Amino acid sequence: MRRHLAAVAALSFALLAAGCSDDGEPGTTTTAPPRAATAAATTAAADPAVAASADAALASDTKAICAQAARTGESFGTNFAADYRVFLGAKAQGAEARARAKEKVTRTVDGYAYALLDMSKLTSDPGLKKALASMGGQVTALKGDFARIDDKRLAEIDAKLAKACGES
């Protein structure tokens, strides 16, 4: 559970940082993370024994890991699309705006890759472990080449997860 929470926390941080930074553009909003998520992460981090036993329980819960991976992928797709639109629009706004936008997209991609790789380390299911590690590797390979991340590529990654989770 500790690794699971770390993955969720890292992805949440990356997505919140990407979506909540004040980039001076109209239509952007700033929100705080939910208190329940923060409290859960703090509790797990405060007691390593609780986190270790939760890790062991979650490792054998393939269904829960599959559900988390699906939610993470869905969240990534939504956030990546929004961040990438800002990145493309930043070309006309100068080098500083483009650099900020690129940093946001990079954090989103990094967070997703990290979460997938972390979930692959957590699961005890060999097929799911292999699929998540492969997915994380695919996402990592796309880092910096955002134009290659499209609906087709995301559908391929999603199909790999569905197959590993017995949904195909």
Image (tube, rainbow, N blue to C red):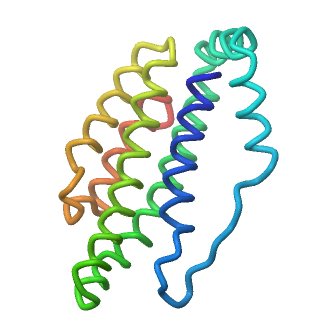
Question: What residue do we see at 20% from left, 56% from top?
Answer: 144
Where does the C terminus fall, quadrant-wise? Answer: top left
* Residue 10 image point, x, y percent: 52, 41
* Residue 40 image point, x, y percent: 77, 34
Where does the N terminus fall, quadrant-wise? Answer: top right
For residue 43, side relative to residue 66 (left or right): right
Question: What residue do we see at 41% from left, 13% from top?
Answer: 126
* Residue 120 image point, x, y percent: 43, 24
Name the residue nearer the viewer: 95 or 108: 95
Name the residue nearer the viewer: 31 or 127: 31
Considering only vertical position in the picture, is 54 above or below 69?
above
* Residue 68 image point, x, y percent: 59, 38
Name the residue nearer the viewer: 83 or 133: 83
Considering only vertical position in the picture, is 139 above or below 61?
below
Quarter-of-image position of residue 41: top right
In the rendered image, the residue lying farthest to the front is 96
For residue 16, side relative to residue 87 (left or right): right
Question: What residue do we see at 69% from left, 17% from top?
Answer: 51
For residue 90, side relative to residue 62 (left or right): left
Number of marks in the rendered image = 0
Question: What residue do we see at 42% from left, 45% from top?
Answer: 112
